[in-house]
Image (cartoon, grey):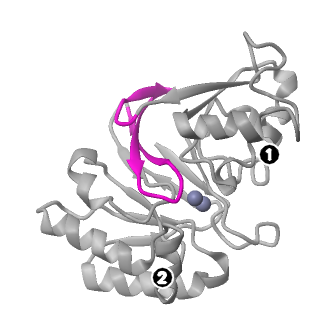
Amino acid sequence: MHLRFLGCHHTETARTRLSSILIDGEVVLDAGAITSTLSAEEQNRIKAVLITHRHYDHIRDLPTLALGGFETGATLPVYAAAETIDALRGNLLDGTMYPNFAEIPSAEQPRLEIVEVQPWREVEVGGLLCTPVPMDHAVPAVGYRVAASGGGSFFYTGDTRGGVAKVWGDLNADLLIVETTFPNAQAEFAELTRHMTPASLERELANISASGLDLPPVIVVHMNTRAEEEIVAELRAVAERTGASITPAYEGMLVEV
Ligand SMILES: [Zn+2]
Ligand SMILES: [Zn+2]
């Protein structure tokens, strides 16, 4: 699999953390930074979107992505868990602020086809095997284990306060893509908002090691741009202490899995 990280670094146009990971140019995880980063042709190549949770930085590009490719006539499947779908239908796609792309041009062939996923039930999306895994966050959330049919897999936590280690044995992925939203100095606020810090990542890695499993390489996303240097320095220290390979993602970063 060919991964491209979008919206995860401070840029002139993205002053706050946004989130999207593009897989093989065709499947995208979360809709925080699709239309602000990809060309029209790149957007039209997208075959499916998987959403982790309802927070705005993960869903905000769905209406603009839908409108952008509306003339193609293609139906774009959007995968999400039930609680997230309720929020999408009730707020973002209710026709108040923008057209309801889940029902136009027709209910039978809408621009966005909302597809419900179930915890731990694998679905095939664009030839990839995707498994939603419930994660502990401020609102109902899932991470996704994604595996290519020809081998190669990763787990993307989405937003969470942790809990990766207790499911890592079941995930058995080649790569961990995890958030660390806040620096250690903001641990209290991280706990309040159900996010991770480098210290909580270190605890997860220690727990994975303690259960006898090898540490996977780690890519970190969703860093608060206003504290990015501090977070990156703390991650470097975590990598030194644990021996783990930890890479902070940057805008446009390409990774092969
Ligand atoms: Zn969130
Ligand atoms: Zn977020």
Observer able to see residue 201? yes
* Kind of residue at badge 2: Glu
State the SS at label 1. loop
- In this orientation, which residue lies closer to the viewer: 18 or 195? 195
In this image, 59 relative to 23: left or right? right
Of circles 2 and 1, which is in front? Answer: 2
Asked if residue 116 is positioned above or below residue 34 in the image, the reply reads above
- Seen at 51% across and 59% down, the residue is 159
- In this orientation, which residue lies closer to the viewer: 240 or 203? 203
Task: Report x, y in % for residue 35.
Answer: 78, 47
- Image quadrant in which you'd find residue 176: bottom left
State the SS at label 2. helix
Question: Which residues fall within the magenta stretch?
Answer: 119-148
Q: What residue is disc 2 on?
A: 188
Task: Report x, y in % for residue 55.
Answer: 64, 54
Task: Report x, y in % for residue 206.
Answer: 22, 73
- Image quadrant in which you'd find residue 39: top right
Crowding at label 2, few (<14), some or many (≥20) Cα neighbours within 10 Å?
few
* Kind of residue at badge 1: Ser
Q: What residue is disc 1 on?
A: 39
- Seen at 67% across and 47% down, the residue is 31
Task: Report x, y in % for residue 191.
Answer: 46, 74
- Image quadrant in which you'd find residue 124: top left
Q: Is residue 218 magenta?
A: no
Crowding at label 1, few (<14), some or many (≥20) Cα neighbours within 10 Å?
few
